[in-house]
Image (cartoon, grey):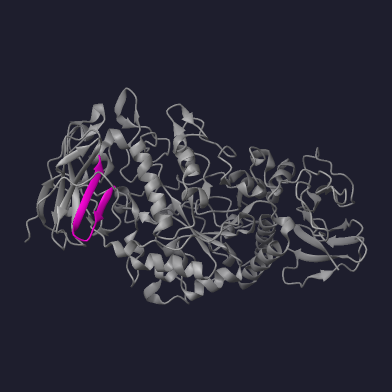
Amino acid sequence: MTKYQIQIGTPFPMGVDHDGNGANFAVYSANATGIDLCLFSPDGQTEEQRLPLPERTGSIWHGYVPGLPHGQLYGYRAHGHFAPDRGHRFNANKLLIDPYTREFHGTFTNAPEIYGYDIDAPDRDLSFSTTDSAPFMPKSVVSHPDLFTPTTRPLADTPTSELIYEAHVKGLTKAHPRVAEALRGTYDGLASGAIIEHLHRIGVTTIELLPVHAFPDDGFLVEKGLRNYWGYNTIGFFAPEPRYFGPAGFAGFRAMVRKFHDNGIKVILDVVYNHTAEGDHSGPTLSFRGLDNAGYYRLIEGQRRYYVNDAGTGNTLNMTNPHVLRLVTDSLRFWVTQMGIDGFRFDLATTLGRETYGFDRRGGFLDALRQDPVLSRVRLIAEPWDLGPGGYQLGNFPYEFSEWNDTFRDTVRRYWKGDEHSTQELGARLLGSADKFDHSGRRSWASLNFLTSHDGFTLADLNAYDEKHNEANLEDNRDGHSGNYSDNCGVEGPTDDAVVLARRARRARNLLATLFLSQGTPMLLAGDEVGNSQGGNNNAYCQDSEIGWTDWTGHDPGLTSFVARLSAFRRDHSVLRQSHFLHGKRRAADRLPDVIWTDFKGQPLNWRDPGLSQFCVVLRASAETTLPEDDTDTVLIAFNRSGRHGHVKLPPAPDGRRWVRGIDTAHPTAAARPEPDQELAPIQGVSVIALILEP
């Protein structure tokens, strides 16, 4: 066994940096009295050497170890006060992972030893644990630099043409019959030919992955025989989650991104920087808590034993600390420049924009992204809420961001459910939610529209269940949302009733048509296009099972074809994906308004009718846009949620053009065809039609 010496080293870069001759280590802690670098045997079982970091520059502890090889396993132990009431939880008995580690060796084991206190003591987290956690912790790895050579530039960002597909790395492929069995559930399998072929068929431009930063399984889930399936409790901001490694191991992640790029598909990551897997005051000590609890986390003033819990998960990272801000922005740049990622969706983004006084759209983190020469050029998407005071911030993020628009989701569901007053709200949602986003130079793509997401019912379940059925989560069905605005179409759950099944299928097409025909950025939940069901579970966060995996065996080819048709229709008609908002202004070129609302008789719409069920909207290019001389792209969309058939009075077609039916949810397989009667277009009950002007 080699005995290494340690030198002063440098305070930069953060984490471990191997220069070919040895490794430099740098880690932040403002309140520690000392930090030890612990070197482990190749199997991770034996701590072979403990080297105190010899120098501190500001709040950065650092040291250089000559001759240390690539692949060396290591961790930290931090010395300092154990005084929970003052916010300090140092315990050198606990091995800590490097916040900047890019690889893990081994896994987290749920055991009493990983807690900084004696879990059986009467005073719980105020007690001090003397047991060593190293046998139950993964080890950080001194990675080989060749794993992280700079990647090619991300694909160009064209948000007005996007179709985002939200997917789980494992869930999308685990049960896919055309993905090789050895690759199912892995990064390698995600970019397999079968998946890329499917994404191309339905017109996906961007795949958005649920968290891939390394994460442990929560102790309370392990005790129930469950797992952290979604991954929203991360701990390794630079390390791909190893459970998704395939035959290529770590390299499989970069190969996955490269293959998506080669096929014209962008990759964005759902990232969780608002909190960590260490939980509240009763959680384990894995990294940040042991290195500097009071530095990394926001603590309650006057009660520093406890954590601010704006994320609702036990703790909140302190983004007002410049070292934490640096950690997060370094992480983001790493995924872009060295892993090839094209953008990010920020979980509970309001938390990231909080200053000591509350949310600020010009706060430190948001400003840091906007000025960064790398991060300001990638796709930025905010989940614009958290559970803290003033947490709901839809429409209040900087112009560079799109935002998950839950008002679109709920309004579309309410309209097709038949709720009164929902049509009036739907009007705003169809046009990109200008009431939320048309300010500060923002564009309609700022509204990220979705019907369903990982969090809630799938589309199939939205039309098959009135109530959630989360019994498999072992929480007595108390978890998950209760206000789903769903409609089981007469029967709760599975049925063989042909009438009910037909109603559900029509309803799914109506919802999807509304999504694809709306201004803004559409997002499709993976599996919705094949009729995937979770059996009524609307919170499958712990279901690494058939419940959470996409079911391809019940594949609905008709629905998939209809989604492909909607996607192509949207792509072919730029009037459906405009950048500028539509307000009914007259266009300078032809004096025609850019949007017109009418009833089926062609008369002005009575917006005051609370039960309004039928309406038409005619879309043209925005009056704010400079039009080419030959611009004639016009789309008429008619919505009919009533059970009555009707006829839509068509505006007179310009000379040489005629109205052509492109979409009809009542006849999803019918080819596009000119209307036989160019004055009146029939529409069935509970359906959507979209017509275009063509020669």
Q: What is the x, y in percent for residue 384?
A: 53, 41
> Horizontal placement of 571 versus 178: left or right?
right
Tell me, yes or no, if residue 118 can be seen here.
Answer: no
Which quarter of the rendering shows the C terminus?
A: bottom right
In magenta stretch: residue 17: yes
At x 32%, y 22%, the residue is: 302
> Horizontal placement of 215 versus 357: left or right?
left
At x 75%, y 53%, the residue is: 641
| Depth order, front residue of 343/333 | 333
In this view, 27 is above or below 668 = above
Tell me, yes or no, if residue 41 can be seen here.
Answer: yes
> Horizontal placement of 555 versus 598: left or right?
left
Q: What is the x, y in percent for residue 326?
A: 36, 42
At x 81%, y 59%, the residue is: 631
Task: Give, as a single range, the part of the protein colored magenta.
Answer: 14-28
At x 75%, y 68%, the residue is: 667
In this view, 472 is above or below 117 = below
Q: Residue furthest top?
A: 302
Q: Quadrant location of residue 547?
A: bottom left
Which quarter of the rendering shows the N terminus?
A: bottom left
In this view, 450 is above or below 352 = below
How many marks can you see? 0
Q: What is the x, y in percent for residue 161?
A: 64, 59
In magenta stretch: residue 667: no
Q: What is the x, y in percent for residue 168?
A: 45, 60
Which secondary structure is most common in the magenta stretch? strand
